[in-house]
Image (tube, rainbow, N blue to C red):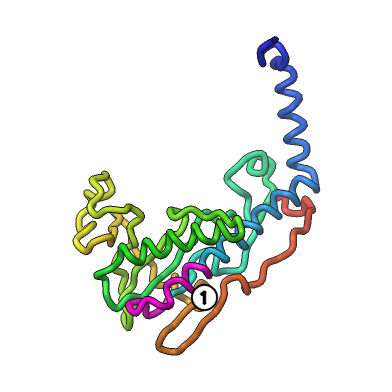
Amino acid sequence: MGGIEEDWDENDFEDWERREEEHALSSAGIAEQNDGLLRRYRTFRRAADAVAVAWRNRPEVAAVALIGSLAAAPWKEVPRFSPYRRARIALWHECKDVDLAVWLTDLKNLNGLRRAKDRTLRELYDASEIGVAPHQVDVFVLEPGTDRYLGRLCQFNRCPKGKTECLVPGCGATGFLRQHEDFRWRPESLAADRALRLFDRASGQVARAADLPLPTCSGTAEGRIA
Protein backbone atom coordinates (compact mmCIF):
# COMPACT_ATOMS: atom_id res chain seq x y z
CA MET A 1 0.00 0.00 0.00
CA GLY A 2 1.40 3.39 -0.97
CA GLY A 3 2.11 6.00 1.68
CA ILE A 4 0.53 9.42 1.91
CA GLU A 5 3.52 10.94 0.14
CA GLU A 6 2.78 8.75 -2.91
CA ASP A 7 -0.92 9.63 -3.06
CA TRP A 8 -0.71 13.32 -2.15
CA ASP A 9 2.02 15.34 -3.86
CA GLU A 10 2.89 19.00 -3.42
CA ASN A 11 0.73 20.15 -6.32
CA ASP A 12 -2.28 18.31 -4.90
CA PHE A 13 -1.76 20.04 -1.55
CA GLU A 14 -1.44 23.47 -3.16
CA ASP A 15 -4.63 22.86 -5.17
CA TRP A 16 -6.43 21.82 -2.00
CA GLU A 17 -5.22 24.95 -0.16
CA ARG A 18 -6.35 27.15 -3.04
CA ARG A 19 -9.82 25.56 -3.11
CA GLU A 20 -10.14 25.91 0.66
CA GLU A 21 -9.23 29.60 0.53
CA GLU A 22 -11.58 30.24 -2.38
CA HIS A 23 -14.43 28.69 -0.42
CA ALA A 24 -13.50 30.58 2.75
CA LEU A 25 -13.61 33.90 0.90
CA SER A 26 -16.84 33.13 -0.93
CA SER A 27 -20.18 34.39 0.33
CA ALA A 28 -21.00 30.89 1.57
CA GLY A 29 -17.67 30.55 3.35
CA ILE A 30 -18.00 33.94 5.03
CA ALA A 31 -21.53 33.02 6.14
CA GLU A 32 -20.27 29.74 7.63
CA GLN A 33 -17.53 31.55 9.53
CA ASN A 34 -19.89 34.21 10.85
CA ASP A 35 -22.42 31.58 11.87
CA GLY A 36 -19.73 29.73 13.82
CA LEU A 37 -18.66 32.91 15.60
CA LEU A 38 -22.24 33.72 16.60
CA ARG A 39 -22.75 30.13 17.72
CA ARG A 40 -19.83 30.65 20.07
CA TYR A 41 -21.70 33.59 21.63
CA ARG A 42 -24.71 31.35 22.23
CA THR A 43 -22.60 28.56 23.72
CA PHE A 44 -20.67 30.81 26.06
CA ARG A 45 -23.77 32.72 27.15
CA ARG A 46 -25.56 29.48 28.04
CA ALA A 47 -22.52 28.42 30.06
CA ALA A 48 -22.58 31.76 31.91
CA ASP A 49 -26.26 31.26 32.75
CA ALA A 50 -25.65 27.74 34.04
CA VAL A 51 -22.81 28.82 36.32
CA ALA A 52 -24.80 31.77 37.65
CA VAL A 53 -27.73 29.47 38.51
CA ALA A 54 -25.37 27.05 40.25
CA TRP A 55 -23.97 29.85 42.40
CA ARG A 56 -27.29 31.36 43.46
CA ASN A 57 -27.72 28.94 46.36
CA ARG A 58 -24.32 29.69 47.82
CA PRO A 59 -24.84 32.18 50.67
CA GLU A 60 -21.52 33.96 50.10
CA VAL A 61 -22.51 34.92 46.54
CA ALA A 62 -24.06 38.39 46.63
CA ALA A 63 -24.22 38.89 42.86
CA VAL A 64 -22.98 37.56 39.51
CA ALA A 65 -22.56 39.52 36.28
CA LEU A 66 -21.53 38.69 32.76
CA ILE A 67 -18.89 41.16 31.59
CA GLY A 68 -16.66 41.61 28.56
CA SER A 69 -17.50 41.12 24.92
CA LEU A 70 -20.14 38.44 25.65
CA ALA A 71 -22.26 41.01 27.47
CA ALA A 72 -22.05 43.54 24.65
CA ALA A 73 -23.70 43.64 21.26
CA PRO A 74 -21.45 41.80 18.76
CA TRP A 75 -19.43 43.92 16.36
CA LYS A 76 -17.52 43.18 13.19
CA GLU A 77 -13.75 43.47 12.83
CA VAL A 78 -10.97 42.07 10.69
CA PRO A 79 -10.02 38.87 12.55
CA ARG A 80 -6.57 37.67 13.55
CA PHE A 81 -6.74 34.54 11.39
CA SER A 82 -6.21 33.98 7.66
CA PRO A 83 -7.41 34.24 4.99
CA TYR A 84 -9.78 36.91 6.29
CA ARG A 85 -7.04 39.06 7.78
CA ARG A 86 -5.08 39.02 4.55
CA ALA A 87 -8.20 39.85 2.52
CA ARG A 88 -9.29 42.49 5.08
CA ILE A 89 -12.73 40.93 5.46
CA ALA A 90 -14.52 41.82 8.69
CA LEU A 91 -16.29 39.06 10.63
CA TRP A 92 -18.18 39.03 13.90
CA HIS A 93 -15.90 39.45 16.91
CA GLU A 94 -14.36 36.20 18.13
CA CYS A 95 -15.25 35.51 21.78
CA LYS A 96 -12.45 33.58 23.43
CA ASP A 97 -13.86 32.97 26.90
CA VAL A 98 -16.58 33.74 29.43
CA ASP A 99 -15.85 36.63 31.79
CA LEU A 100 -17.87 36.62 35.01
CA ALA A 101 -17.74 39.06 37.91
CA VAL A 102 -18.81 37.65 41.26
CA TRP A 103 -19.35 39.64 44.44
CA LEU A 104 -18.54 37.55 47.53
CA THR A 105 -19.24 38.27 51.18
CA ASP A 106 -16.87 35.49 52.31
CA LEU A 107 -13.70 34.15 50.67
CA LYS A 108 -13.27 31.08 52.84
CA ASN A 109 -14.62 28.55 50.33
CA LEU A 110 -13.35 29.68 46.95
CA ASN A 111 -12.43 26.11 46.13
CA GLY A 112 -16.07 25.14 46.63
CA LEU A 113 -17.05 27.90 44.22
CA ARG A 114 -14.54 26.56 41.69
CA ARG A 115 -15.78 22.99 42.07
CA ALA A 116 -19.40 24.09 41.61
CA LYS A 117 -18.44 25.90 38.39
CA ASP A 118 -16.52 22.93 36.99
CA ARG A 119 -19.28 20.47 37.91
CA THR A 120 -21.90 22.67 36.26
CA LEU A 121 -19.91 22.82 33.02
CA ARG A 122 -19.58 19.02 32.99
CA GLU A 123 -23.32 18.63 33.57
CA LEU A 124 -24.07 21.15 30.83
CA TYR A 125 -22.04 19.11 28.37
CA ASP A 126 -23.62 15.83 29.48
CA ALA A 127 -27.12 17.29 29.09
CA SER A 128 -26.76 19.26 25.86
CA GLU A 129 -23.24 18.70 24.49
CA ILE A 130 -22.44 22.37 25.06
CA GLY A 131 -18.70 22.18 25.54
CA VAL A 132 -17.06 24.94 27.57
CA ALA A 133 -13.89 24.02 29.45
CA PRO A 134 -13.33 25.24 33.04
CA HIS A 135 -10.37 27.39 32.00
CA GLN A 136 -12.62 29.20 29.49
CA VAL A 137 -14.63 30.72 32.34
CA ASP A 138 -12.64 33.56 33.89
CA VAL A 139 -14.02 34.68 37.25
CA PHE A 140 -13.22 38.14 38.68
CA VAL A 141 -13.86 38.33 42.43
CA LEU A 142 -15.18 41.67 43.75
CA GLU A 143 -16.05 43.12 47.13
CA PRO A 144 -19.76 43.86 47.67
CA GLY A 145 -20.60 47.51 48.20
CA THR A 146 -17.31 48.87 46.86
CA ASP A 147 -16.80 46.81 43.67
CA ARG A 148 -13.14 46.56 44.72
CA TYR A 149 -11.25 43.96 42.72
CA LEU A 150 -9.82 41.22 44.95
CA GLY A 151 -8.39 38.73 42.45
CA ARG A 152 -9.51 35.89 40.22
CA LEU A 153 -10.88 32.49 41.05
CA CYS A 154 -8.02 30.04 40.60
CA GLN A 155 -8.43 27.21 38.10
CA PHE A 156 -6.09 24.80 39.92
CA ASN A 157 -7.40 22.07 42.23
CA ARG A 158 -4.85 22.81 44.96
CA CYS A 159 -3.52 26.04 46.45
CA PRO A 160 -0.68 26.54 46.11
CA LYS A 161 -0.23 24.26 43.11
CA GLY A 162 3.51 24.79 42.78
CA LYS A 163 3.18 26.34 39.34
CA THR A 164 4.96 29.42 38.03
CA GLU A 165 1.65 31.29 38.25
CA CYS A 166 1.65 30.73 42.01
CA LEU A 167 4.83 32.80 42.43
CA VAL A 168 3.11 36.13 41.69
CA PRO A 169 3.19 38.27 44.86
CA GLY A 170 -0.02 37.90 46.84
CA CYS A 171 -1.23 34.89 44.88
CA GLY A 172 -2.72 32.34 47.28
CA ALA A 173 -2.56 34.64 50.32
CA THR A 174 -6.27 33.86 50.33
CA GLY A 175 -6.74 30.27 49.24
CA PHE A 176 -7.69 29.89 45.55
CA LEU A 177 -7.65 33.65 45.00
CA ARG A 178 -5.25 34.16 42.12
CA GLN A 179 -3.28 37.32 41.39
CA HIS A 180 -1.90 38.23 37.97
CA GLU A 181 1.28 40.21 37.57
CA ASP A 182 0.77 43.67 36.05
CA PHE A 183 -3.00 43.13 35.77
CA ARG A 184 -5.18 46.18 36.30
CA TRP A 185 -8.90 45.80 36.86
CA ARG A 186 -10.98 48.20 34.77
CA PRO A 187 -13.97 49.50 36.78
CA GLU A 188 -15.65 50.48 33.51
CA SER A 189 -16.10 46.74 32.88
CA LEU A 190 -19.20 47.05 35.08
CA ALA A 191 -20.79 49.84 33.01
CA ALA A 192 -24.41 49.21 32.04
CA ASP A 193 -23.56 48.76 28.36
CA ARG A 194 -20.72 46.34 29.14
CA ALA A 195 -22.23 44.10 31.81
CA LEU A 196 -25.36 42.09 32.50
CA ARG A 197 -26.29 41.37 36.11
CA LEU A 198 -27.33 37.71 36.05
CA PHE A 199 -28.14 37.52 39.74
CA ASP A 200 -28.38 40.02 42.57
CA ARG A 201 -29.37 38.78 45.99
CA ALA A 202 -30.20 42.19 47.46
CA SER A 203 -32.59 43.25 44.71
CA GLY A 204 -33.76 39.80 43.68
CA GLN A 205 -32.78 40.56 40.10
CA VAL A 206 -32.32 37.57 37.81
CA ALA A 207 -31.48 37.71 34.10
CA ARG A 208 -30.32 35.35 31.38
CA ALA A 209 -27.38 35.94 29.08
CA ALA A 210 -29.10 33.67 26.54
CA ASP A 211 -31.81 36.32 26.15
CA LEU A 212 -29.37 38.92 24.88
CA PRO A 213 -30.01 39.60 21.18
CA LEU A 214 -27.71 38.34 18.46
CA PRO A 215 -27.58 39.40 14.80
CA THR A 216 -28.23 36.98 12.00
CA CYS A 217 -25.45 35.97 9.63
CA SER A 218 -25.60 38.08 6.47
CA GLY A 219 -23.50 35.69 4.42
CA THR A 220 -22.14 38.48 2.24
CA ALA A 221 -18.67 39.84 1.62
CA GLU A 222 -19.69 43.41 2.37
CA GLY A 223 -17.37 43.47 5.35
CA ARG A 224 -14.24 43.90 3.22
CA ILE A 225 -12.16 46.78 4.54
CA ALA A 226 -9.86 48.77 2.27
Q: Residue at x 34, y 79 (%)?
A: 59
In what quadrant of the picture does the N terminus appear?
top right
Number of marks drawn: 1
Q: Quadrant of the rendered structure where residue 178 is? A: bottom left
Residue sticking out furthest to the bottom: 203
Q: Quadrant of the rendered structure where residue 16 is? A: top right
* Classed neighbour count for the residue bearing mark 1: other residues with Cα under 10 Å, few (<14), some (14–19), many (≥20): many
On screen, residue 108 versus residue 205, left or right, reads left
Q: Quadrant of the rendered structure where residue 215 is? A: bottom right
Q: Is residue 142 above or below residue 163?
A: below
Where is residue 63 shown, x and y percent of the image? 41, 78
Q: Secondary structure at mark 1?
A: strand
Give, as a three-letter code, the residue at label 1: Leu
Q: Please state which of residues 75 and 217 is positioned toward the viewer in this rendering.
A: 217
On screen, residue 135 versus residue 194, left or right, reads left
Q: Which residue is mark 1?
A: 196
Q: Residue at x 41, y 85 (%)?
A: 201
Where is residue 90 shown, x and y percent of the image? 67, 52
Residue 175 in magenta stretch: no
Residue 52 in magenta stretch: yes
Q: Please state which of residues 201 and 76 is positioned toward the viewer in this rendering.
A: 201
On screen, residue 1 versus residue 178, left or right, reads right
Q: Please state which of residues 44 and 88 is positioned toward the viewer in this rendering.
A: 44
Q: Residue at x 67, y 43 (%)?
A: 84
Where is residue 13 shown, x and y percent of the image? 71, 22
The region drawn magenta spans: 49-63
